[in-house]
Image (tube, rainbow, N blue to C red):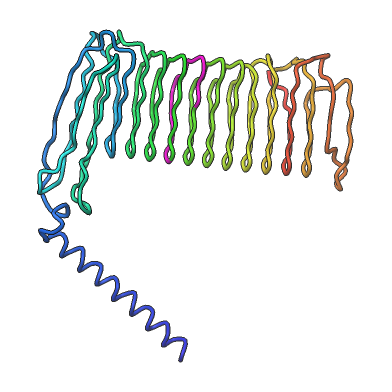
Amino acid sequence: MRTSGILAIIFGGLALAGLILAGTIFLLQRSSIFPGFSGNNENFDESRSTSTKDIGEISIKTASININIQKISGTELTIRLHGTVRNSQNVKPELKVSTAGGKIAVSAEWPPSLILGFSSSSMVLDVQLPESFDGEMAVRSTSGNIEANTLRLSMLDLETSSGNIKAELLSADNLTAHSTSGNIIINDIEAEKAEITSTSGNTRITSGKAETYRQESRSGTLWVGTLEASEASLTSTSGGITVDNAAGGIKFSSTSGNVRLSFSAIRQLITGSSTSGNVTLTLPGGSAFVLDLKTASGSLKSDFPITTTLTSGRSSAGLNRKILGTVNNGETPVTVESTSGNISIREGK
């Protein structure tokens, strides 16, 4: 009886709190103190244009506004901010474009406002970038998505704190894309140096070609369709790593997740580790390399005949914990270590 009485009091209190919250929201919606809770949707459409002649750098900064970047013919940079705004005190985003010292600075942000003094929907900043511009571009979004298509620049830096990055055909000497909380999906990357990182989200690259390539998903899966790089680093703290077709050197690390890498050619060092997960490498048939495998708790398997083999440290199940050997008199190192997981080296076509 005493327990049921206590539960009744708790549920009654929660119900009362819910009624108070609902009533508060109802009053705020009709209050003149917090006008952001009321108002009608209004269309917003504002544009700016400026020449990119003698311009070497363009920076774009937004807050709670999506960004869409497209290449166009000509020499004029055209910026258009459009969408709908809901407010009752004429609270609207501010579009600013300034030019100084060979740089163009673009910002589209909301002015400071009292508690929920504004609300917006479907606000978009369209950036039409002339094909003649091949300098540096930095894009920052505090809370919004970034889309970009067919860009060829000396430097491209895309970053959003809370939103997704989606792009196609990106080419730059130095290319970076980072999302603190969101996914990154890019169909084609070509760069001297490329860095794709997400703190919380998946990263998916259809095709990546670079001298130096780095891709990281701290909390999410990492996938690459085709990867060609002299030096590639792939890291996932919590999530799997998959590469369908790799050519070049790769260093990989996965704390919690399976690793699956398929190679069309072995040209440089392949090395990596997995703390908790299986590792499967598929190498071209007839490949020549030096194999070094180690696991603390798991099995080791190779489809390739190992001509010179050193095995040691058998597990309680009689499985080898370390294999060191040469395949087809090769010299390129293939080194894999797993703390808790199986390691398989498969022979492809």
Residue drawn where x is 62% and y is 43% of the image: 256
Q: In the image, is 247 to the left or to the right of 78?
A: right
Q: Quadrant of the C terminus?
A: top right
Q: On screen, 339 above or below 29?
A: above
Q: In the image, is 57 to the left or to the right of 120?
A: right
- Can you give x and y, in whole percent of width and height, for residue 290 in the image? 80, 20
Residue drawn where x is 78% and y is 39% of the image: 295
Residue drawn where x is 21% and y is 24% of the image: 97
- Can you give x and y, in whole percent of width and height, for residue 12 in the image? 33, 80
Q: In the image, is 18 to the left or to the right of 9?
A: left
Q: Nearer the viewer, residue 143 or 331?
A: 143
In the displayed orientation, state which residue is furthest to the front.
Answer: 101
- Can you give x and y, in whole percent of width and height, for residue 78 in the image? 21, 19
Magenta residue check for 186: yes
Number of numbered labels in the structure image: 0
- Magenta segment, principal secondary structure? strand
Residue drawn where x is 28% and y is 39% of the image: 64
Q: Nearer the viewer, residue 9 or 117?
A: 117
Magenta residue check for 315: no
- Can you give x and y, in whole percent of width and height, for residue 309 in the image? 88, 25
Q: Which residues are magenta?
A: 181-195
Quadrant in the picture for residue 288? top right
Q: On screen, 213 above or below 4?
A: above
Quadrant in the picture for residue 188? top left
Q: Nearer the viewer, residue 107 or 175?
A: 107
